[in-house]
Image (tube, grey):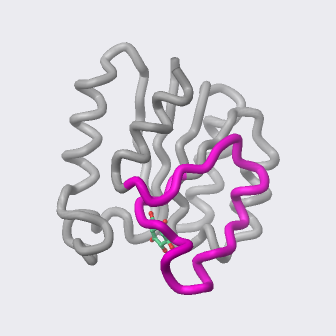
Amino acid sequence: MKLLILNGPNLNLLGKREPEIYGSTTFVEYFKELKEKYPTIELSYFQSNIEGEIIDKLHEVGFDYDGIILNAAAYTHTSVAIGDAVKAIETPVIEVHISNVYAREEFRHHSYISANASGIIIGCGLKGYELAIQSFL
Ligand code: DQA
């Protein structure tokens, strides 16, 4: 099984960025744990701060992989183009947010991705990525 974790802007700063919201673990550390825990899955990881690179990655894997776990971060709330890309591809996408966006500012309550996601996991911390993996198994 081939799965991609795709993280959007500022998530390269996990561990340093607002730890009271996002925790103090870096994604590289967490990804290493996931790889060790699920050795039979071909699990890959890509992060970009650039909208077009996220879209290109969705196009690249979206007709081939078995699943994409997407945290588009702030682009979730702004990007019609990422929403359209999720709709355009065949691979199912699970949308993940580390924090409970509904308990935060109102501009975080809208997602351009949710309507075309096969599932949504919100507010479970980094554990949300693992829950998404399990849902694909
Ligand atoms: C986030 C929530 C977004 O509103 C925010 O812009 C992020 C991270 C989350 O994982 O909780 O960067 O997607």
Residue 123 drawn above or below residue 5? below
Residue 81 drawn above or below residue 41? below
Q: Residue 44: x percent and y percent?
A: 41, 34
Q: Is residue 97 left or right of residue 30?
A: right
Closest to the observer, 97 or 46: 97
Q: Residue 29: x percent and y percent?
A: 19, 46
Which residue is outermost to the top?
40
Q: Is residue 4 left or right of residue 38?
A: right
User: Residue 42 sits in which quadrant?
Assistant: top left
Q: Is residue 125 left or right of residue 69?
A: left
Q: Which span is picked out in magenta?
A: 96-124
Closest to the observer, 55 or 106: 106
Q: Residue 74: x percent and y percent?
A: 53, 73
Q: Residue at x 61, y 67 (%)?
A: 76
Q: Residue at x 76, y 34 (%)?
A: 90
Closest to the observer, 41 or 118: 118
User: Residue 84 sits in which quadrant?
Assistant: bottom right
- Number of callouts: 0
